Image (tube, rainbow, N blue to C red):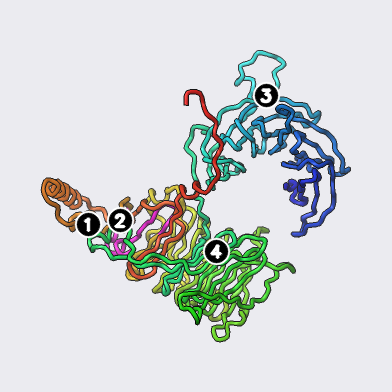
Amino acid sequence: MSTNHANTLLAVGCDDGGLRIFDIIDDGLILIKNLIRNDAKVMALAWDNDDKFIVSGSSDSNIIKWDIHNARIMQRMTVDMKHGKDNIVWSIKILKDGTIVSGDSLGHVCFWDGKHGTMLQKFKAHNADVLCLASNKEGTMVFSSGVDRKCNLFRIADYFTTQSSNDDFNENHWVLVGFRRTHLHDVKAMALREDLIDKFFVSGGVDASILVSYFDGFPEDKLQRLPFIPQKPLISISKSKKLLMYRSYNQIKLWRLGNAKLPDSWKLEQIPNLDLIEPQQAILEMTLKGNYHLTASALSEDGEWIAVSDIETVKIFKVQNDPSNPDRICVKKVKFPKILVNGSSAGAHHLMFTLDGKKLVIVNIDSSIIITELDNSQHKEVKILHQFYEHAQPLDGNTSIITSIAVSSDSRWLAVGDLLNRINVYNLETFELHSTLPKFSSTNTALAFYPTKPTLVITLSSNEFFLYDIESQKLDDWSLTYSKSLPKTFLNLENRLVGCTFNPINSDAIILWGANYLCLIDFDKCRKEKGHQPHLATCTGWRENSKYKAIEQAPKQNGLTKKRKRDKTEKNIKRAKTDKKIINFQLVFRYRSLMYVDFIEPNTMIVVERPFAAILENLPPSFYKAQYGS
């Protein structure tokens, strides 16, 4: 599929070799043209810059140029075949000057004259299928990648680059500048961004990795690997019942968490992994019917309600124990009113229960917010109480998607943030908009309420965070003093903040987390030590005033080991006494690919990881070609 540059038409390539053109104005989908050729499948599409014709790549070695207005074929180009077998044209790109670029299953990247249909250049740039192409707006750079995981860069070579004295030198001569192999499996998509000072391109594929590479330093410069874990959590928990729910493509799985053996007190600061004395237990698995994958899910705090949604419907289930078998769970579907958006049935982007279990917050696909009431007496239906539309309203002609929601522990406040950086706080008792937060310098990534007071924590994509007092409708005193002077090391962390949690026993500290780190922030130390700026330290566990308290309290050893431990401890204590910096930001990097972090009770935190190696284990073998001497 491919849209034209005016975003008014959608072209769809079909298995019968034809093209269907749809009008997509006003969010509609109206078939206006049907172009049929033959039985070869259409594998790739690209519109020209004036939206007058389409170039398609087929499974029978052909590249077809279509006249959209007259619904006819203008040109046919044929790529090389091997031993008489068809060569699949997987990718097509049309450059600013009309040059057509193709990538095929033989690993060729070909440049074609868009006017006459003749081949200008051909590169055997890949060892396997070329699945994707990308180019800059000026049409002077082309990137290619595919099954062999290589990402190639082609550039137009000027006269001085080639050092040619030939007067007939072709200005559109392309050269392969270099390549980089960064993915671990097939690369299926690439996109460029050029509106920033540091221009970059993004690639992604089967290995679930999204990589960011910059134009200027390619292929030598360092790249950035974005987290493969979705920013919107796939996990919900019930703290009181110690239940954990996970959402996959079309399934909901529910576990009862186990119990762990408490460690020795001197180990607590090191965030030990606790030994289980009772393992977790899978108690429910639901496979939902439907043609679409699940987009949102939620578990109520009392563990009695489950809400799920795809792009079309929201479903509510009541969870009960089986009277005949106490160890068995029964799930009963509850009647839910159909949600309509522009006259069509719609699902939700976000779902969240209030902590008292009386209301369900539903964020629609159009960014409107529905507040529903759960009937705890009859369990027969769900009633719609109110609807908010502030985030559904365009801003400067742009619509947005809600990315973050949070409900306070007293079920009174609802905070909502979107990609246009609008953050609103609603009163769920009066169903009124309570306040609109000031716009921050970067987009919000997560919202969370303090469990003991009406204070909202806002994390940003810049790794800044702010505390907002709901009742006074202004930033907290700590934020006014310190939020603009956070440690640079913390702000420059490669992975952005995606969540926030609180230890119920300590109201003066929070834990912020990203894809591969936890950060404990102690507000009390900043308040007590006036004049001290926030200072960050990397460690394996939380430390108190003395950096080496855990070492001082470690159990004694015998023999030579005892002496070495004592010497090391004395050295560390001496170093700690001379260090006058107050450590109020503490980073821990022991976890990787974090999916969820939260406290289920005082001093007990649950951390859900999804190691990258576990993702690779479930993938089919990637392309491999033996090299000489290997």
Q: Earlier in the sequence, mark 2 or mark 3?
A: 3
Q: Nearer the viewer, residue 449 or 397?
A: 449
**Which three-letter amino acid code belongs to the residue tagged 3?**
His
- Kind of element beneath mark 3: loop
**In front: label 3 or label 1:** 1
Q: Position of residue 342 (x, y in %)?
A: 73, 67
**In front: label 2 or label 3:** 2
Report if residue 521 lies within the magenta region. Answer: yes
Contact flag, marks 1 and 2 (Cβ < 8 Å):
yes
Q: Position of residue 321 (x, y in %)?
A: 49, 78
Q: Residues within 10 Å of mark 2 (few under 14, many from 20)?
A: many
Between marks 1 and 2, how big is the CA–CA gap? 9 Å
Which residue carries the number 3 mark?
173
Which residue carries the number 1 mark?
550
**Residue range (magenta):** 512-535
Q: Earlier in the sequence, mark 3 or mark 1?
A: 3
